[in-house]
Amino acid sequence: MKVLLLGFIVIALTGVIIAAEPRKDVIPSVTIEGVVYEDIRFGRVMPPTVTIYHKRGVANVPLASLPPELQKTLGYDKIKAEAERAAAEQAKIVAEVHSTPSTTICTALAADLTNTNLLAKLKLKADTTQSPTTRAQLLTIYYLGKLCTSAGAEAQTAWNSLQVINPSAFANLFDTCATCGGKGTVETDCPGCRGIGNCPICDGYGWVQFSWSLWDRYRICQHCKGTKLCPVCKGQKTQSVHCRQCTNGRQFSRQKLQQTYWQLVTEACNQ
C-alpha cells in the first residue's frame, strides 16, 4: 500500500513539473509593429504574412515586421522577398503600359509635365513599341522630360541620348549666343601687349640699348625682330578667344527646352 501511494506521489510531482515546463514552440513575448503579443505560436506562412496564435486570439502579421531571428526561423529572406515584390510590381506596370495606348499616356502627361511616373511609363511604352518612328518620337519626349525634371548624371544621360535619338530636336534647344553674336569667339585685349599694339620690349622703337657705356650701343629688338609691333597680335591690339558663354556660337535655352517638350507632347496626344 505504501509503495502504491509513493508511486502516485511521484507521478503527481512529475506531472506538475511537466505542466510547469514551457512548450518549446511557444514564444513568451514579441513586439510586432508596436503591438506586444504574448504566448505566440506560428501558424501557416503565406508570404508576405504569417498567422500567429497568441494569448488574446489570432492575427496575420507581415513577415517583414518580425525580428530578424524569427524571420530566419520561418525561412524568410527579406532581401529576396523585396526583390521578388519589386519584380512583381514592375511586371504589373509593364503589362499595364503594354495595354495602354501611347496617346493616353501622353494626354495624362500633358496635364502634368513633371510627373516622373508617367515619364517612366512612356519609356516602357517606347521600349515595347515595334515602330521605329513611334519609338523615336516617344523617346524624344521622354528625354526632353528628363532634362526638365532631373539633374546630375541622370540629366547628362538624357542630354547625350537625345543627341543620338533626335539631333534635330536637340538642335532646337539652342539660341544664338548674345555674347559673341553666334561667332563662337570674342575679341579681348592682347595679353602680349595689353592692348597697346606695340612691342612691349622695345616700346615700339624696333631696337634696344644693350650697352650703357660712354658710347651707347643698340641692336635690333629680338622680341619683335625690328617690326616695332607686338608679335602676338601683330599690332592689332586684340585677339580672338573662344566664347565661354556658348558652344560654337549656340547657347542652351531652358525656355526652348520647355517649349519643345510641350509641343511634342501635344502633337503625340493628337495622333
Image (cartoon, helix red, strand yellow):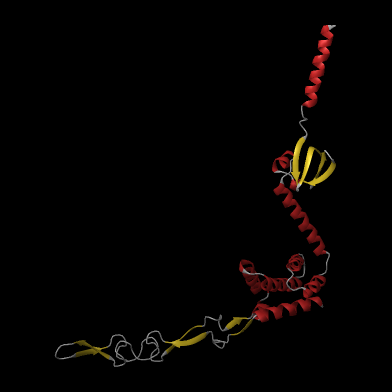
Q: Quadrant of the N terminus?
A: top right
Residue at 82 percent of width and 12 percent of height: 7
Residue farthest top in this picture: 1
Residue farthest left in this picture: 214
Toward the viewer: 54 or 169? 54
Picture coordinates of residue 236 (x, y %)?
41, 92
Q: Is residue 210 above or below residue 154?
A: below
Residue 47 visible somewhere in the drawing: no
Toward the viewer: 257 or 170? 257
As drawn, is 148 to the left or to the right of 23?
left
Q: Quadrant of residue 68?
A: top right
Residue at 85 percent of width and 42 percent of height: 58
Residue 189 visible somewhere in the drawing: yes
Residue farthest bottom in this picture: 205
Q: Quadrant of the C terminus?
A: bottom right
Picture coordinates of residue 203 (x, y %)?
31, 91
Toward the viewer: 139 or 149? 149
Q: Is residue 49 above or below residue 238?
A: above
Q: Is residue 52 above or below residue 165?
A: above
Q: Quadrant of residue 87?
A: bottom right
Picture coordinates of residue 27 (x, y %)?
76, 36
Residue at 79 percent of width and 73 percent of height: 106
Picture coordinates of residue 23 (x, y %)?
78, 30
